[in-house]
Image: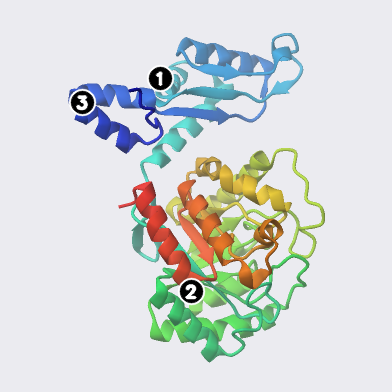
Amino acid sequence: MLRNLNPSDIDHLKKELKEIEVAPQGIDIMLPKSDFYVFKTDKLNSHAAILLKEKMLDINGECAIAEEAVTNSNNEYATILMSTRAQFDKLVKELNTENYPKLDFLTEELKNFFASLDVDCLKIRDLTLQLDKQTLVMGILNVTPDSFSDGGQFDSTQQAVSKALEMEKQGAGIIDIGGESTRPGAEPVSQEEELERVIPVIKGIRQQSDVYISIDTYKSKVAQAALEAGADIVNDISGLNFDSYMADVVAKHDATLVVMHIKGTPRNMQNDPQYENIFDEILEYLDNSIQKARKAGIDKDKIIVDPGIGFGKKWEDNYLILSHLKEFKSSGQPLLIGPSRKSFLGKLLNRPVDERLEGTLAAVTAGIMNGADIVRVHDVSQVVQAVQVADKITGKK
């Protein structure tokens, strides 16, 4: 009988090697050779692309480049690299030993990527959370009259605080409070109105609970007031692109930050969004957001990335993102997804907003199986149960 083992499940493969009594030193040598990766680079000039192909062949790896790169030295070409971790480690050593300035970026990014595989943690306040042990559930609390799903349900501070405490009891580790609807076509509200909606709720929760609180805003003054009132996290749908002061505010308060991808603004983001390559564009956007955050002084272990399901995407794009979610792990940051009750589920299932629980559970489970660390949802009680099962399947401890 021939059995197909999954080379990406390193823990299980190590267990299998031990069961057939391979020597420990042999396991250490062999495991990196089974760990296979495929990377896509930005465009390089033809000389650097050809040089990279030669170096990959030297280590018995593969480098795919355009056929015309050999004969046309005037253009730039993206490459796709295919090799085991052991071979990529060898490539990094060789590039470090020799002087190839045009490939310096590759050396650094490969080192950072593989280093990030061994670190799966997030800092909130002065605590370090081990995301390899449990997927975090972020409960949505919209104190707005016009949010697409729960708008107008929590008009009073007392109602909102009670809902937050209920979600905490159900298993939410984070409560995400929003005072401005960011549904497609939504009109912005004034800073003053947003503050009036969210600050009393944050203070009310904080008086009764130590749960982590996130403020869902792209306005730096709202974020500052929320952090001063007791919030721990800023969830910026613009990825630091709508307000130039946001990164400094987060850094000043030593807060945790979520940077999300959006194409356009909530008002126009669903007006026929187009992508040449959706993964390249989202990753570039998120990388720029991470660089802004790091430049402002925000620690790397306090940054979360969100590909922005439903924010400037065609409905089919959201399924593509969920199915290839692992690609966003190349950012080296914890990964958040927010599929809850969104229209891409309704489009497929032909269900209104309040009948999308089953679709949400499926999307959340698929997201966790594909690398999500945090899930942002409305239906906390039901999602927590799905998360427990998905975490067990994926081997979270």
Give the position of the N terminus as an image quadrant.
top left
User: Considering depth in this image, is 24 or 395 the residue closer to the camera?
Assistant: 395
In the displayed structure, does residue 144 sit left or right of residue 226? right
Q: Mark 3 points at which residue?
A: 20
Q: What's the residue type where badge 2 is placed?
A: Ala
Q: Which of marks 1 and 3 is nearer the N terminus?
A: 3
- Give coordinates of residue 169: x percent, y percent: 39, 77
Q: Name the residue under label 1.
A: 90
SS of the residue under disc 3? loop
Residue 297 visible in this rendered orientation of the protein: no
In this view, 73 is above or below 129: above
Look at label 3 and name its amino acid. Answer: Ile
Residue on which disc 2 sits: 231
Residue 285 x/y as whole percent: 65, 47
- At 63% across and 45% down in the image, what residue appears? 320
Q: Nearer the viewer, mark 3 or mark 2?
A: 3
Q: Examine the image and state in which quarter residue 165 appears.
A: bottom left
Mark 1 nearby-residue class (10 Å; few <14, some 14–19, many ≥20) = some
Could you tell me which secondary element the residue under label 1 belongs to?
Answer: helix
